[in-house]
Amino acid sequence: MKAVTNQEIREIDRKAIEEYGIPGLVLMENAGSRIFQNLKNIYPDLRLKKIIVFAGSGNNGGDGFVVARHLYNCGVKVKVLLLSLFNKIKGEARVNLDIIDKMGVELIEIESIDPEEIQQSIRDSDLIIDAILGTGLQGKVTGLKAKIIDFINMANKEVIAVDVPSGLNSDTGKIEGPCVKATYTITLALPKIGLLLYPGAGYTGKIIVEDIGIPVNLLNRKKLKINMITKDMVRSFLPIRLTYVHKGSFGKVLMLAGSVGMTGAAYLASEAAMRSGAGIVVLGIPRSLNPIMEVKLTEVMTFPLAETEKQSLREDTEETILKLMENFSVLGIGPGISRQLETQRLVRNIIEKSTIPLVIDADAIYALSEDPAILKKTKTPLVITPHPGEMAKLINKDINYILDNLLDITRDVAQEFGGVVVLKGARTIIANREGEAYINIGDNSGMATGGSGDVLTGIISSLIAQGADNLLAAIAGVYIHSLAGNLARDIKGERGMVAGDILSQVPQAFLSLE
């Protein structure tokens, strides 16, 4: 599903009205009626509730007027508090305001009453509908609107935001002043990018995307480059598994991972590749650690390699590894491989000379920070999976700069270095060199645990081995990893779950998509 900026959704609305001939009043009516239907679904006792609609002067307020009309017709006790003078509301919003005025819906111009009356109305209500600003935010909210938002948040009532919580930048997710803290956000036509990114994502509550009758070819235009990952999307990306096949049909993963003290990373990555459907997985490991891995792994095969005195892969194993790679579908490289200088040189050489697709993670990303230009020299498809700290190191930027610009940085790095970039986080972002980006909705603090990224490396590597291209493998891998984490959370809870719990649920995550 596409996700859009404020300018993009305005252009979509304009085309729907001017080029397709759909009246703006029809779109506003559809929006309000769909929000009303959601209210009935969310609150079976809706008729018993006292509801306040806070409405601004624009189309967001107009949507709120339509909702108020349907609520009134349904017998709900509803009042509308206007953040603008009645005679300053124009266009389609004014048409719908006139209708509810004639119907007898209680309308109050907020400027005509004192703040205590407003707060008392909020205290007396059961539910608040925020139709103040929507995507119409320009800079920081100030004045009367800021005061009302503060009143709403202080009341600790359930809030339904129309399209976007007022105060949230719908393009970036940034919060520059007061912002409504919603229980649900019912966003119209397509999700707005700012709803999907933190800190804004922390204000949206549960997001519901509602169809308002805009032609589908406007919603799926190729020029819209940002996407929200959905279950149906991922299901369509999974490699097909035919019945009459053998293990070689599902690809061969070579994983270079592990060093002394880091055998867990090697285990998690290679076992995740196996559990994600690869036919054969081989782990290349420092020779002295091979006995440990043979105990830890059963189905994954091991390949002992020459090691340094500090039990990491030695630089002169390069020729052996490059020869070995000729028989594999993909190379996963980096989990726990160490930051020993000799091993880091080996990693850079392997990445530069690889003849098979690459999934680059952890210590291999650290190795690239010495010479990121190697990524431009790589001639095979690649996926690189940094967390924000690794990204900061890779592009020599402050971590706070990364955290403030997650989407732009992911796209910029993918376009500069080629390949697919997976910037991991609460909202993992995937981008390719064409500027296409995908945002995964995964709010699970239990995923923030050592080894979680190693599991992801294994999943993505396995999907590439099975025939998915690097972008589709990254998108599906991130979603399945997140889904497995949610299944683990249901069993262990967010506080107690570990990476092994995520790994254990990978097969069930795939099963839920079959």
Image (cartoon, rainbow, N blue to C red):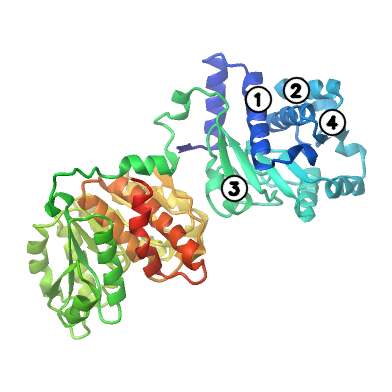
The three-letter code of the residue at mark 1 reads Met
Helix, strand or loop at disc 1? helix
The mark nearer the N terminus, 1 or 2, is: 1
Which quadrant holds residue 103? Answer: top right
The three-letter code of the residue at mark 3 reads Lys
The mark nearer the N terminus, 3 or 1, is: 1
Residue 40 screen position, x and y as percent? 68, 36
Tell me the tag on residue 28. Answer: 1
Taking the view exactly as shown, the residue that stands out farthest to the bottom is 309
**Residue at 14% in and 54% down:** 247
Depth check, mark 3 against mark 2: the one in front is 3
The three-letter code of the residue at mark 2 reads Asn
The mark nearer the N terminus, 4 or 1, is: 1
**Residue at 21% in and 82% down:** 311
Q: Which residue is mark 3?
A: 206
**Residue at 62% in and 37% down:** 163
- Check disc 1: other Cα within 10 Å, few if <14, some if 14-19, many if 20+: many
Q: Which residue is mark 2?
A: 96
- Check disc 4: other Cα within 10 Å, few if <14, some if 14-19, many if 20+: some
Number of marks in the rendered image: 4
